[in-house]
Each structure stands twice: as structure tokens, then as C-alpha cells.
Image: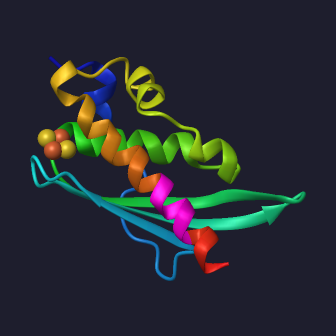
């Protein structure tokens, strides 16, 4: 049911953990399944651009939620905030070589948490 890449990110998640004193953090929950996800970002200004220097996630949820969180952090790391904000759930699913249709909502959680973290960063500035 899951692609090899989903299994890889699920069993060996990248960037899992917490950032102390993050520049932005975003938490989202899925009211249907009860899963929770939190994303932390550290932002660095470089060549007049605000880049995601570090990013970590904590997820209490299903395998897809963990795999999509892991993939979102990989996609966002090193990008500027505008590019990171544009990462869509389809980008995440494509990078993971597909998600079962019933699991697409799990990838929403990851992209929504990232958007919230970026918003939080701007609101603190
Ligand atoms: Fe809840 Fe996947 S089933 S996020």
C-alpha cells in the first residue's frame, strides 16, 4: 500500500525533534483522526532573503503523517520563506512517490504546520 519512499521516511524520519527558541512554530491537529503535528523553524537572513536554516518536527500520528512531516522538512530546509510557503501537499506526495488516496489528508497536516510556523515567524518580527 505504501511506496518504498514513504516506508523509508516513516521508519527513518529526517529532522525529527524540537528546536529550542525557534524563530517560528506551527501546530496543527486533525480533528478527524486526532493526530497532532508541530513544526519548528530557524530563519537566517542571507543576501536579503530569509532562508530556513533549520527545521524540525514532532508528530503524534499515523505513518503517513510521520513520513509527510519528514519530507516537508527535507523540502523546506535551505529554501527561502516564500518558496517554503508554496510547498503543496501534492509536492509532498509526489516526492514520496505517492500516498494512498485515503492518506492524502495526512500530508495537509505537514504543509499546514509549516505555513503556520512561517506565519508565526512573521508575526513575531
Ligand atoms: Fe491522522 Fe494520518 S490518519 S494524520
Q: Is residue 46 left or right of residue 20?
A: right
Q: Is residue 23 above or below residue 97?
A: below
- Residue 10 visible: no
Q: Is residue 105 left or right of residue 42?
A: left
Q: Is residue 38 above or below residue 9?
A: below
- Magenta-colored stretch includes residue 91: no
Q: Residue at x 65, y 60 (%)?
A: 53
Instruction: Look at the image and give the residue range highlighted in magenta.
Output: 115-120
- Magenta-colored stretch includes residue 118: yes
Q: Percent from the top left, x then y, of residue 124?
A: 60, 79
Nearest to the observer: residue 56 or residue 14: 56
Q: Main secondary structure of the magenta part?
A: helix
Q: In which quadrant of this rendering is ligand 1 seen? A: top left
Q: Quadrant of the N terminus?
A: top left
Q: Percent from the top left, x then y, of residue 11?
A: 24, 40
Q: Percent from the top left, x then y, of residue 35?
A: 16, 54
Q: Percent from the top left, x then y, of residue 78?
A: 66, 49
Q: Residue at x 25, y 39 (%)?
A: 106
Q: Residue at x 38, y 26 (%)?
A: 93
- Residue 5 visible: yes
Amino acid at each position: 500500500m505504501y511506496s518504498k519512499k514513504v516506508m523509508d521516511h516513516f521508519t527513518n524520519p529526517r529532522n525529527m525533534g524540537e528546536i529550542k527558541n525557534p524563530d517560528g512554530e506551527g501546530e496543527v491537529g486533525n480533528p478527524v483522526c486526532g493526530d497532532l503535528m508541530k513544526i519548528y523553524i530557524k530563519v537566517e537572513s542571507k543576501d536579503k532573503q530569509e532562508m530556513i536554516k533549520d527545521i524540525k518536527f514532532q508528530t503524534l500520528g499515523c505513518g503517513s503523517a510521520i513520513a509527510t512531516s519528514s519530507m516537508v522538512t527535507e523540502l523546506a530546509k535551505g529554501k527561502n520563506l516564500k518558496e517554503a510557503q508554496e510547498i503543496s501537499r501534492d509536492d509532498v506526495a509526489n516526492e514520496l512517490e505517492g500516498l494512498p488516496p485515503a492518506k492524502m489528508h495526512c500530508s495537509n497536516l505537514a504543509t499546514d504546520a509549516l505555513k503556520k510556523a512561517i506565519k508565526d515567524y512573521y508575526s513575531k518580527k
